[in-house]
Amino acid sequence: MPHHAPIGVFDSGIGGLSVLQALRAEMPAEQFIYLADTGNAPYGERGDAFVMRRTQTLARYLVQQHGVKAMVIACNTATAAAIDQVRQRFPHLPVVGVEPAVKPAAMASRTGHIAVMATRGTATSSRFAKLVASMPHGVQCRVQACDGLASAIEAELAQDDPSTLVDGGARALHGRTLELCSQYLAALGPFGSEAGAADTLVLGCTHYVFAQAFIQDVIGTKVQIFSTGGPVALQTQRLLAARGQLATAQSSDLVGGVRLLSTGDGNSLAQAAQRWLGIKTEVRRLSAR
Ligand code: DGL
C-alpha cells in the first residue's frame, strides 16, 4: 500500500468530523477521505442488521474506489455493530473504531460514578456491555440512550449560517438539541464532586462532541468530559508508523488534505466542516446504496 494513499474516515453524518479534527492534528501530512452516510442516518435507532450492512458497504467503497491505506470508523454505533466484520473482510488493512471512553472515565472518577450518553444502538450492544464489565471494581456506570439527539445536532448544523456563529458554534446550538441534552442530562444526574454524584461524563457518540460546550455548562466545570478523538488519532498514527506507511510530506491537492463525500444532502457536512475544521470545500454526492 503506497504511503501517499488516503486514510478513509466515515460516520452516519457529521459526528465523525470531531474525530477527523484529531486525526488531522496528529497527522497533518496525510490525506483523508471523509464519508458521511447522510442518506441513511441516523444509525442509532436503526438496529444492528441495518448498521452492519451500511458499515460493510461504506468500508468496501472506501477500499475499492479510493484505495485507502487505513480506515477509521468514526462512529460508536457502527463500531459496536460491525468492526469485527470489517476487520475480517479486510485483514491487511488497519481498521480503527471508536468506543465510549468508559475505562479512562472510570480511572479518573473520584466519586466512583460515571455517566455515559450514547445512541441506543451503542448503549444496548454487547460490545458496550463488555466495556462496562471491564471497568475497575466498584465503579458505577449510568447509561442514557439519547434517542433523536444526533439527528437534532445534524439538523441544526445544516440550517445555520456559520458566519453568524460565535464560539465555534458550540453555544449557538438551540431548540431541539438543547432540549434533548437537558432532558437526558437530568435523567443521568446528579453530577458533581459530592458522594453519589457522577464526576465524569462520557460522550459515547461522535455527534455529541458538537454540543460539548453546552453540556459542560449544564453539568458544571467540576465534571470531566471524555470523548475519543485524540486516542483514536494516536492509535491510527501508531498503526501506520509500524507499517512504514505514514505520509512523508504533504503532497495533497485537496483543500486542507480532506475530500468530503456524502450519500445525502451535503449541506450539514459542508457547514460543519467549515465551522469546526475551517475547511471550505465542496461535498461530492454519492448514491445512497
Ligand atoms: N455519530 C454516530 C455515533 O458515534 C452515530 C449517530 C447516529 O447516526 O445515530 O454513534
Image (cartoon, grey):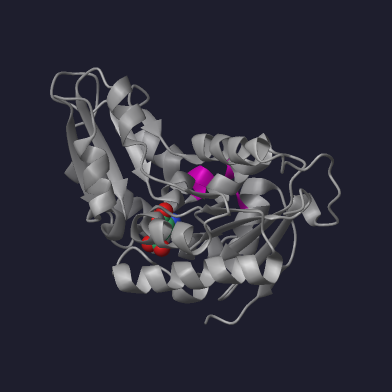
Q: Using the rendered image of the protein, determine whether residue 189 is visible from the camera's viewpoint.
A: no
Highlighted range, magenta: 164-172
The location of residue 20, given as percent across then percent down, is 60, 48
Task: Tell me what residue is drawn at x 45 percent, y 55 percent.
Answer: 75
Left or right of 226 in this view: 189: left
Q: Residue at x 60, y 56 (%)?
A: 272
Apparent side of residue 9 relative to residue 123 in the rendered image (left or right): right
Examine the structure image and report whether residue 191 is included in the region drawn in magenta. no
Give the image location of residue 94, x and y in percent.
Answer: 56, 49
Give the overall secondary structure of the magenta segment: helix
Report the front residue among 163 and 286: 286
x then y, percent, for residue 233: 57, 39
Q: Is residue 108 left or right of residue 229?
A: left
- The percent coordinates of residue 258 (x first, y second) are 72, 55
Q: Quadrant of residue 67?
A: bottom right
| Residue at x 45%, y 50% (from the top left corner) | 206
Work out whether residue 165 or residue 76 is closer to the camera in this orientation and state it: 76
Question: As displayed, is residue 285 above or below residue 186?
Answer: below
Q: Quadrant of ligand 1?
A: bottom left
Indicate whether residue 168 is drawn in magenta: yes
